[in-house]
């Protein structure tokens, strides 16, 4: 196994945009301390050859739950659909789809012993596809924490106004950044035969690391949330983006109200869509990882963009004898941990 590359920045060492943590606390002392509710953005069809299941699960990951649903329904696990992967050590509520049985419906209550509760069942026309969700709502309890109410209020207001850096979380990189180490072996030609799914995880981790490194540079420059000449700007809430040579007052105003965000590269074949000094910065960061840009292109990945900034919607906090309770909403593809690290250090 190849060693990490020089200059490798793990998630815990990424720079913070809003200052040092306000304190330290205990996260995930019990599964109910981390609650996630998925938002699909559309309603069940109430007709069709599939069933949409609204499922609450405790201390169970998404793929394992899909296997249990498939077993009970008597269908191949490949026919079970879900929109996104959820944390295991949590209470998570999300949608699954299964082919609609020709006879009686399974007794879903048989899954209760596995920590899986089917809350609703609706007919639906199609299998639920990955990425179909619009976002997630979070309710997070941080215990054993002592915070200044004034400091907390100021930090929350800063995050509401500016958002947080939209870095990829530690889950993307595996234990001890193992997915990155294996990606390096893949690019070096020393990984041997690798299943396609596993290879995809490693490639995704590699381009995510290049993105995180670029975002870290923009945070250090304090322009991660403000459009700069040469930026490729992404509209909030969608994948549409456009390049700009100069920044005028209208673009500054739209950036200030979180309507558009600077973006960073998800590396692949081709050249970044940025220009001038911003493109030079992106290419310099990618060059820290010899063989990675070429390897990502060789495996068929294309240049894509991801917003550098993550708006945090409906952010509230409440302190009690149990610690700090946070509630907020994030769009699909975002990590709650990147919000937490801008507030508090968690153990």
Image (spheres, grey):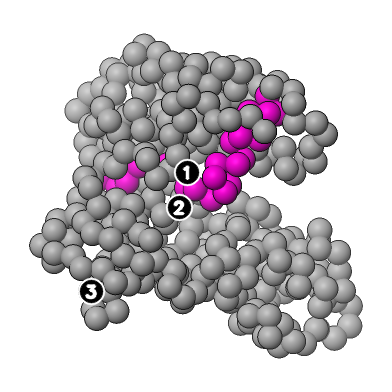
Q: Taking the image as drawn, is residue 125 in sight?
A: no
Q: Secondary structure at mark 2?
A: loop
Of the two numbered discs 2 and 1 on the same chain, state the one appearing first in sequence.
1
Magenta highlight: main SS = helix
Q: Does the segment drawn in magenta span residue 244? A: no
To which quarter of the image does residue 269 belong? top right
**Location of mark 1 (residue):** 168
Q: Does the segment drawn in magenta span residue 179? A: yes
Q: Which mark is residue 335?
A: 2
Quarter of the image where the C terminus is located: bottom left
Label 2: few (<14), some or many (≥20) within 10 Å? Answer: some
State if disc 1 and disc 2 touch (CB < 8 Å).
yes
State the CA–CA distance, disc 1 to disc 3.
28 Å
**What's the residue at 46%, 75% (across, down)?**
30
Q: Is residue 289 above or below residue 114?
A: above
**Location of mark 3 (residue):** 319
Which residues lie in the magenta part? 161-187
Q: What is the number of callouts on the image?
A: 3
**What's the residue at 30%, 33% (across, down)?**
219
Of the two numbered discs 1 and 3 on the same chain, state the one appearing first in sequence.
1
């Amino acid at each position: 196994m190849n060693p990490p590359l020089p200059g490798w920045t793990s998630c815990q060492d990424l720079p913070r945009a809003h200052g040092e943590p306000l304190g330290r606390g205990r996260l995930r002392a019990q599964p109910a301390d981390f609650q996630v509710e998925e938002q699909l953005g559309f309603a069940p069809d109430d007709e069709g050859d599939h069933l949409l299941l609204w499922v609450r699960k405790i201390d169970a990951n998404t793929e394992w739950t899909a296997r249990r649903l498939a077993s009970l329904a008597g269908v191949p696990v490949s026919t079970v659909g879900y929109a996104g992967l959820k944390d295991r050590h949590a209470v998570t509520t999300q949608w699954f789809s299964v082919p609609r049985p020709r006879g009686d419906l399974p007794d879903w209550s048989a899954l209760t012993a596995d920590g899986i509760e089917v809350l609703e069942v609706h007919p639906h026309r199609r299998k639920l596809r990955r990425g179909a969700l619009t976002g997630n709502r979070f309710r997070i309890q941080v215990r054993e924490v002592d915070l200044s109410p004034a400091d907390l209020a100021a930090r929350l207001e800063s995050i509401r106004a500016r958002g947080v850096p939209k870095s990829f979380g530690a889950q993307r990189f595996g234990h001890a950044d193992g997915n990155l180490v294996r990606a390096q072996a893949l690019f070096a030609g020393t990984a041997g035969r690798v299943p396609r799914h596993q290879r995809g995880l490693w490639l995704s981790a590699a381009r995510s690391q290049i993105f995180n490194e670029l975002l870290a540079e923009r945070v250090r420059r304090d322009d991660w949330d403000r459009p700069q000449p040469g930026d490729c700007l992404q509209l909030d809430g969608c994948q549409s983006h456009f390049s700009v040579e100069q920044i005028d007052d209208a673009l500054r105003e739209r950036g200030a109200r979180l309507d558009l965000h600077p973006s960073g590269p998800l590396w692949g074949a081709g050249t970044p869509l940025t220009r001038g000094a911003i493109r030079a910065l992106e290419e310099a960061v990618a060059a820290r990882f010899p063989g990675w840009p070429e390897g990502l292109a060789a495996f068929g990945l294309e240049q894509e963009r991801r917003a550098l900034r993550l708006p945090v919607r409906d952010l509230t906090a409440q302190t009690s004898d149990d610690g700090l309770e946070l509630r907020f909403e994030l769009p699909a593809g975002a990590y709650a941990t990147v919000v937490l690290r801008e507030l508090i250090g968690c153990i």
